[in-house]
Image (spheres, rainbow, N blue to C red):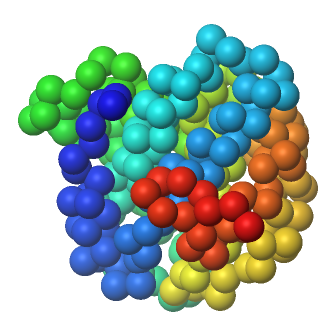
Amino acid sequence: SGPRCPTRGGWAGAVRKKTPDYDPDRPRRVSLYSRGVARALRARTGHIRQLDDGAVEIMCRASLLHDIGKTAIPVSLLSKQGKLSPAEFEIVKRHALLGGTAVLELDRKNSLSEEFVAMALDIAMHHHERWDGTGYPLGLKGEDIPLCARIVALADTYDALTGKRVYKPPFQAGEAAAIVRRGRGRQFDPAIVDAFDLCERSFSAIADGAYTNGRVIEA
């Protein structure tokens, strides 16, 4: 049940054509990480209204589109092995706003639900904002950043750290978790990092591929 997202494979495939090492399972992992954090945050802080089961499932589906804007970024930048220059990084950063445009275009073609579109827009546009206000594209700070985007920001960062990239090898789960914790109050909402602490074990399982049909296989 819930809003269908028939386009995830299409945009992920488009990104993969541009970046041959792109992992097509990355959107699914980010979605699963986001679900785990949202449930832990609800249990820990009582965000009942914003994070009821329906809202969490919409967020999980919407998070599949978090990097859809990268389909509009030049392949030479997405696949560059060395460090991006400041000018190149400014171009890559455009994928956040371009992601919002892409979500609206998907809605035009597929007539998606209002709830799904609203959350997909928030996530695509704002998952690179930082708690301290130094992120992009708008420099939003603290609770001005939509809650769903704050959650996906942590999930996306963890997956980027533990995944292989053209410019770096994968970090071990413990190293990635330590980096996430160091970002508490700077890159990430402190409450969301605390929620991550409660579900870190499931993150390790997801990173190892221990899930099926969207459910984590418990050890």
Q: Taking 21 as reference, is 32 above or below it?
A: above
Q: Percent from the top left, x then y, of residue 210?
A: 59, 70
Quadrant location of residue 156? bottom right
Residue 112 visible here = yes
Q: Percent from the top left, x then y, of residue 181?
A: 88, 54
Observer-nearest residue: 212 or 122? 212
Q: Is residue 196 left or right of residue 68?
A: right
> In which quadrant is the N terminus drawn?
top left
> In which quadrant is the C terminus drawn?
bottom right
What number of labels is visible?
A: 0
Q: Percent from the top left, x then y, of residue 155?
A: 63, 52
Identify the residue at horizontal 82%, vertical 22% (top origin): 45
Q: Is residue 78 left or right of residue 188?
A: left
Observer-nearest residue: 58 or 218? 218
Residue 153 visible here = no
Residue extending furthest top? 49
Q: Taking 119 as reference, is 93 above or below it?
A: below
Observer-nearest residue: 78 or 10? 10
Residue extending furthest left? 109
Quadrant location of residue 190? top right
Identify the residue at horizontal 43%, vertical 57% (top origin): 213
Q: Is residue 4 left or right of residue 47?
A: left
Quadrant location of residue 98? top left
Q: Taking 154 as reference, is 115 above or below it?
A: above
Q: Percent from the top left, x then y, of residue 173?
A: 78, 72
Observer-nearest residue: 217 or 14? 217
Q: Taking 176 as reference, is 166 above or below it?
A: below
Identify the residue at horizontal 26%, vertical 60% (top origin): 9
